[in-house]
Image (cartoon, grey):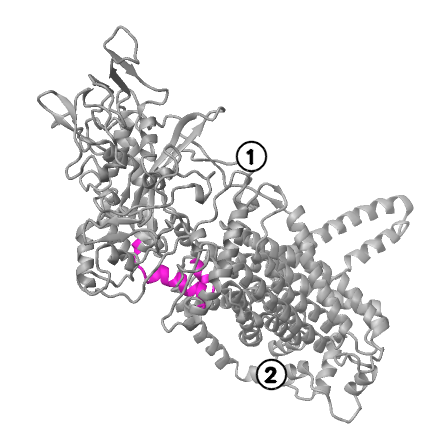
Amino acid sequence: ELLNKPGYEKYCALAYTSCSQYNPYNLEQTSEGCCVAGLGAVPNSVGTGLYQATTADGCFMPSSPIQWLNKYGDTTYDDVGSTMASIQAASSSDFANLVASLDKGFDIDTNVKSSFMKVNFFFGAPMHRPNMTSCDPCLHEFEAWFDETYVTDLQDLLESTPVRMTFNYDWYDPVGDQILLDMSLVFVGIFFVFFYMCFIFQSVFLTCCSLFEIFMAFFGANLIYRFWWPSDSGIGYEYFTIFNGLSLFIILGIGADDCFVFTDIWNDNGEEGKFKDVSQRLSATYTHAGKAMLVTSLTTVISFFSNISSSFVGIKTFGTFAGLLVVVNYLMVVTYFPAAVIYYHTYLREWPWKGLFPCTKTKVAAEGAEGGGNGKKKFSLSEWLRYTYAPALFKYRYPVIAFFAVFILVFLVLAINCTATPFEYYTLFTPGTNFYDFLYSLYNEFPAMSSPLYAYIMFGIDKDNPVEYQSGFNTYDFVAGKEGSGLPVYDTLFDMMSPQAQAQLHDTCYWLSDPEVTPNLKDLKIETGYGVNPQLEPGGSTSTTGGEFGTQCLMDAIAKWENVTTWDASTQQFVADPPPGRSWEGDMSTQCRYCFTNFTTDPLPKSGGVYDFEVGGVSADEDIINVPAAMINTTEVLDGCNCMGVFPVPEVTCLNEMSYLSGNSRYQCVTTPYGNFAGEMRAFLTSSQDNFDWWKKYVYATKTSTGALDRVVMTYIKVQLTMSTTDPDYVTGMAMVEAWDDWAERYNKKIKMIDGLAGNQAVVHIPKAQSWRMTGILTPNAVSNTLLSLFLAWIILLGATMNWIMAGLAIFNVSMIVLIIFGLLTLFGWGLGLLESINCVLVVGFAVDFTVHLADSYKESHRHTRFEKTQDALTVTGVSILSGSLSTLLATFPMFFAVITFFMKFGYFMFLTMGLSTMFSLGFMTALLMEVGPVGNAGELSNWYGPWVESAYVSLQEELQRIDADTHAASGGESGEGGGGAPNGNARKTVREGAVPTNRGGEARTTIREGPVETNKSADAGADASAGA
C-alpha cells in the first residue's frame, strides 16, 4: 500500500547500476539521465528462483524480515524456521540483517518468534540539478510531498490498526511544534496568578504593577546576561536555551512572594496613629521588608550562582541567568514596586470602581470589613495562624517533629539510592505518544545489532592534538549553524599509499578479531561473530539490501578485489586465475580485471606464494610484513583490465617494452606522484556502484589549488561492538572506552619503524562515550553543586541573623527539603539525568526562601519566649509564605499537562519544592523554633566577639582617662585651680559615661514559662503594643 502511493517512483531511493564509469554517483544528472535499472532480479545463490532487490523503477525495496525470507525462496512463509536456519548457514551478513529486524527475544534455536517487526523504507530527494546553487529546494519539494502523501495515512494507521504501529522518519521532529504548544501553558499559569494576586491585593492596579515588575526583571536580566555579564570568551553569553526561558516561572514565584511580603508589612504598619505620615510608614516598611527580601534574595542568588562551577554548559548558564533574574527582581521590588504602592495608597485606594472590577476593594467594602457592617467579623488568616494554628502546633510539637523525622529517614534511604540516568532522546515526550513509543521500542525491544555501536579506529588524525578550535571559541558561546566545534588536525606523517601502510591497515582489521594478538577482546566488547567484511561473502549483502556488521575494513575489500592471481612456484611468477568458485564472466564483472599474464614482485612473497598478513603484529617482535616495492618482468597489458591483481599494491610497475614505449632498456618502470595505490583505489571505487556507495565515506582527501588530488589524509576501520548506541549502562560503557584508550596507547607504541617509515598512529572514537561520560559525572556534579549552594546559603544566613543556632536550624530545614527532592527522584523512577540536574539548580534557591522569611521574623520579634517569638513570626510572614506558595503552585500546575517531559518535570519540581518548602517552614521549622529556637542572647555571635569588644572599649576608656588627666594637669598649671580645663573635662566625662556593654551573653536571664499564656486577643494586642513601644 505504501509503495503504491502516487509519486513514489519519483522520490524513492534509486539503486543505480552505474551512471558513469568514473563518477557513478553523478549528482549533476537527473534521475531520467541515469541508468536506474538497478539490481532488478538478482540470482538467489541459496534458494530457488530470483530475488527482486528493486522495483521495476529501480527503487530500493523496503528492508524487512519478508525481504530476507523472499530472497531465500520462502515466498509463502510456510517453513520460516528452516528458512532462517538456511540464511544463518549461508550468509552471516544476511542473517544479521534479518535478526536486526526482529525483537531481542528471537532465538534461532529456542524461540523462532518475534513480538516486534521493523520495516525500513528508503526515499531520496530529487537530484541536485546544474542550475541549482544548493539542494535545499529539492529537499523542501520532497518533504512537502511526503507530508502530504504519507503523514496523514500513517497517523490514521497509528490510531486505527489493531496491532500497535509506530513510525518515524529522518526529518520527523515533533519537538519544535510541541514546545510551542507546551509553552502556551505558561500563559495559563500567568492567568491563574493574575486572578490570585487580585484576590490577595484586592487591587487590579497593584496586580498589574507586580506582574509588570516581574516581566521587566526577566528582560532586564536578559540584557545583562547577553551584553554585560562576563563569560569565558569576554562579555556576554549567546547561549540561551529553553531552560533559561523557563526561569520566568522562577521569578513569577519569587517576585510575587516579595510583593506579598512588602504589602503585608506595609499593611501591618498602617494602624491608625502608628506613624504620623506616609514617609515614616514607608521607612519602617523598608527597614523590615527590605532586609527580609535582601536576605532571601541573596541566599537564592548565591544558590543559583554556585552552579557557575558546573561542568555542563546548560546548568552553568541556567544558574547564571536565574541568579541575575533574582538580582534584578530585588532591585525592581525595592524601587519600582514601593512607588506603585505609594501611588495606589495616595490616589487609588479610596476610588470606588462601581463593580467594574469585582476583585478590588472600595472604600465602603473596606469600612465594612474593618468594623461594622452586618456585625460579622471578617476571617483573618494571620489571626488564625496566631491564635489557632500556633497553639495547636505547640501542643503537638513532639509528634510533629517525630513525624517529620520518620519522613526524612524514609527519603534519606531513597536519596542514597538515587543514581545517574543517561539522557535518551525519546524521554523528551511522555509515554503513549508516537515519538516516545517508536524510539523506546527501537532502543529497548530490538537487539543491539538493530542499532549497533561502532568503534572508529581512525588513521591520519593527530592523536595528541586532534581538533583545532577557532581563536576565542568556547562551548558556552556555541550557536548551532554559526560556529563549528573545530577543525581536524591531520597527522602529517600519515601514509596510505606505501605497501607497508597498506599492510598495516589490512592486518589491523584481523588483529582485532585475533585473541592471540588482541588478548583483551572481551574488554573491548568487539563483536567477533561476523568477522571482517561479511558482506563480501558469496551471496552477501549489498549497499542496497544490507547494513554494516562485523569489522568494516576498506583495505581488506581492496585486497579481496586485487587478489585474483595465483603463484606459480616453478616459474616464480604470478599467473592470472580467478578466485576459487568464480569465473571471469558474469559475477566477475564488478571485480578486478587482471592486467598482466604473469609477473613477479620484488621482493618475493615470504612463503607459499602469498604475502602472510598474519605474521608479526602488535604483540610480535618482528616487522609487520615483507611487502612488495615493485612489480617487474611483466608481459603486455591485457585489454579491458582495471587493476594489477596483487596486494599490497607495489609502489612501482615495470612494463614490458611495447610499441608506445621508448627507451633503450627492456622494461619501462612507471610510477605516479601518488603511487600506484591511488589509481588502484580509484579503480576499485568506480568498479561498481555498490563499491562506491559502500566505501566512499572511508577515504578523506585534500586537493590542490588546481583541484588535483593533494593527498589522502584520513581513513578508518569500523568495528562493531556488542553494545548498542542506546545502551544506558554507562559504567560498563566507560570501562570499555577506557579499555579502547589503553589499546590505542599500546598499539601506537608497538607499531615499529619499517624501512625507515613510521607506522600510522591510531585514534579511537566511540560516539556514545560523550553521553556516558556526561552521565557518569551528573550525580557528583549535582551533589557538589547542591552542597556548595547549601554552604553559601548558610554563610549568608549566619551573617544576616548573627546567630549560629538560627542559621543552623534554617539550613538544616532547607537541607531536609533538598534531601526529600533527591529521594523523590528515586521514588518516581527518574534518577538523576541531565533534565533532573538542571531542575536541581532551583531546589536550594526556592527551598531557602520561606525558611529565611520565618527565621528573620523570629529574630525581629521582641518577645521573650520561643512560643511568643514563633507566634509573631507566623503572624508577620505566615500569610506571605502561604500567598507566595499558592501563587507559584498555581503558575506551575498547568505544566503537569505538558507533553514535553522537561516541562512536565519542571512543573513537578517547582510544585513539589514549593509545597515541601511551605510544609517544612510552617511545620517542621516552626516546631523546631518552638522547642529549640534561640532566646535572649543564646547563639548570638556577639557572645564570642563581645568580650573582645568590651575589653577593647575598657582599654580605650582607660587611655582616654589618662589623656584627660594629663590634659587637665597641664591646663591647671597654666590657669589655676578649676581653670579653663573644666569644659574639656566635662566633655571627656560625657564620653566616659556613655553606655558600656556589661551584660555578657546569658548573665541576666529570667526564667519564663513557654507556651500560650494569654488567650485574650485584646490583651495580647496590648502586649504587642507595649513590646513595640
Return the residue found at the far left. 570
> Residue 214: which numbered mark, if any?
none
Badge 1 density bin: few <14, some 14–19, many ≥20, Cα 10 Å:
few
Residue 102 or residue 181, whichever sits in front: 102
Badge 2 density bin: few <14, some 14–19, many ≥20, Cα 10 Å:
some
Is the residue under label 1 in contact with that under label 2 (CB below 8 Å)? no
At a point 79% along the width and 49% down the height, the residue shown is 965
Describe residue 710's horizontal placement relative to residue 525 as left or right: right
Magenta stretch, residue numbers: 424-449
Residue 99 seen anywhere in this rendered image of the structure: yes
Per the image, label 2 sits on a secondary structure element best described as: helix
Cα–Cα span, label 2 and label 1: 63 Å
What residue is shown with label 1? 471
Residue 896 or residue 915, whichever sits in front: 896
Residue 154 or residue 882, whichever sits in front: 154
Describe residue 667's horizontal placement relative to residue 440 as left or right: left
Whether the magenta-drawn stretch holds residue 325 is answered as no
Residue 507 seen anywhere in this rendered image of the structure: no
Identify the amino acid type marked 1. Ser
Return the residue found at the far top. 664
Q: Position of residue 782 (x, y in %)?
A: 47, 57
Using the rendered view, name the quadrant where residue 624 is placed: top left
Q: Position of residue 185 (x, y in %)?
A: 60, 68
What residue is shown with label 2? 389
Locate the C terminus and report the quarter of the image it occupies.
Answer: bottom right
Residue 1024 or residue 77, whichever sits in front: 77
Residue 716, above or below 896: above
